[in-house]
Amino acid sequence: MLNFESDYLEGAHEKILRRLIETNMEKLPGYCTDKYCESAKVKIRELCRCPEADIYFLAGGTQTNRTVIDASLRPYEGVIAAPTGHISTHEAGAIEDTGHKVLEIESNDGKIEAVSLIKYLKDFHDDVNHEHMVYPGMVYISHPTEYGTLYSKDELRRLSSVCAEYSIPLYLDGARLGYGLMSEGTDVALPDIAEYCDVFYIGGTKVGALCGEAVVFTKENTPRHFYTIIKQNGALMAKGRLVGIQFDALFSDGLYFAISRNAIEMANILKNILREKGFRFYNDSPTNQIFIVLENEKMKRLQADIGFSFWEKAGEDHTVVRLATSWATSIDDIRALADLLR
């Protein structure tokens, strides 16, 4: 069976595995205090053009979202997110488990628009009963979104401006950030994200690493005792070197960007094949996530040979499914998939 279910099905890029083997017998201090973690931090700061950035390494995305959001909010605050946002849908109530409510707001194709955010915040503060309500204390966005869409630089700037007006941080989930940065037509680069977001994370798990995410606080705004909070959440790895070495490798010689570009190139080829074969697209995703609408019987036939993700129902007889390319997808994979699509 060919599997295009997600972009973290393979292990890790061979250059990362090689570095892990090469450094395996070095005796290094724990808890992300080793030289490789420090080297990776230097490289990330340089790429973000943000010398004051404060950087931490955690193992996975849900763990990262939970820790960052919990540390950033007061007990009476919640986090604003799109209904399709990962923290709203696929994190098993991890945020709510910390005692913070996810405050869903109107979105468009997975994205929160500044005009909707302004209305939400204004309506909240104009409500004479707002002291009895959950305060909006942070805005969470994904880039790329869960529907493969991207924010423009202007959209990020507008959201950042609204958040600044209301003195709440803008947090960007970058689980698939590499694929967004390498997508055709985007005008958003790492320095833009560092400028407009108060905190974001660079995803490694879905972009070539065995595991690991790099959290970046950009405005000298790290929550007090964040290191301790990471440990309290069970997210501080004793062998932090495992993540540090991987990010040090990812940000050496442009590896992160090169392998992200591969996913986009393979996705573009696959989109053309799907178009030629008459498949109907659910949306126009410029990233490595491709959403198509299948008649249910056809979906069942294809499932016998192809792995893909259920996304949502599209009426009684049709379903939206996702095909995802990755850093490891090859042209042979695409050709084999093309032979099975009928």
Image (spheres, rainbow, N blue to C red):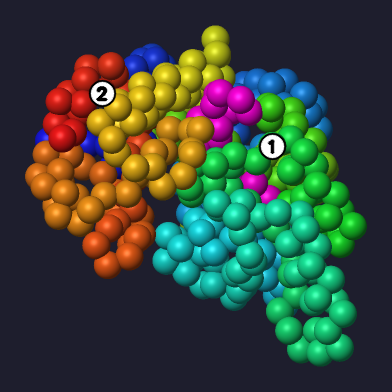
Which segment did they paint magenta? 171-186
**Residue drawn at 22 percent across, 36 percent down:** 3
Q: What secondary structure is found at the residue carrying circle 1?
A: loop
Residue annotated with mark 2: 334
Q: Which residue is mark 1?
A: 152
- Image x and y of residue 87, in percent: 52, 60
310 and 63: which is toward the camera: 310
Q: On the rendered structure, is 266 left or right of 144?
A: left
In-image side of 180 versus 219 (left or right): left
> Per the image, is 175 magenta?
yes
User: Which class describes the residues within 10 Å of circle 2: few (<14), some (14-19), or many (20+)?
Assistant: some
Mark 1: give few (<14), some (14-19) or many (20+) Cα within 10 Å: some
Mark closer to the chain start, 2 or 1: 1
- Report which quarter residue 264 is drawn in: top left
Q: In this image, 150 relative to 246: left or right?
A: right
Residue 248, magenta (yes or no): no
Q: Name the one closer to the observer, 83 or 240.
A: 83
Residue at point 90%, 57% (across, down): 165
Q: Which quarter of the figure is the N terminus placed in? A: top left
Position in image of residue 330 (x %, y %) = 29, 19
Q: Residue at left 80%, top 27%?
A: 51
Q: Secondary structure at mark 2?
A: helix
Vertical relation: 196 (above or below) 99? above
Nearest to the observer: residue 152 or residue 43: 152
Q: Amino acid at mark 2?
A: Ile
Q: Name the quadrant of the C terminus.
A: top left
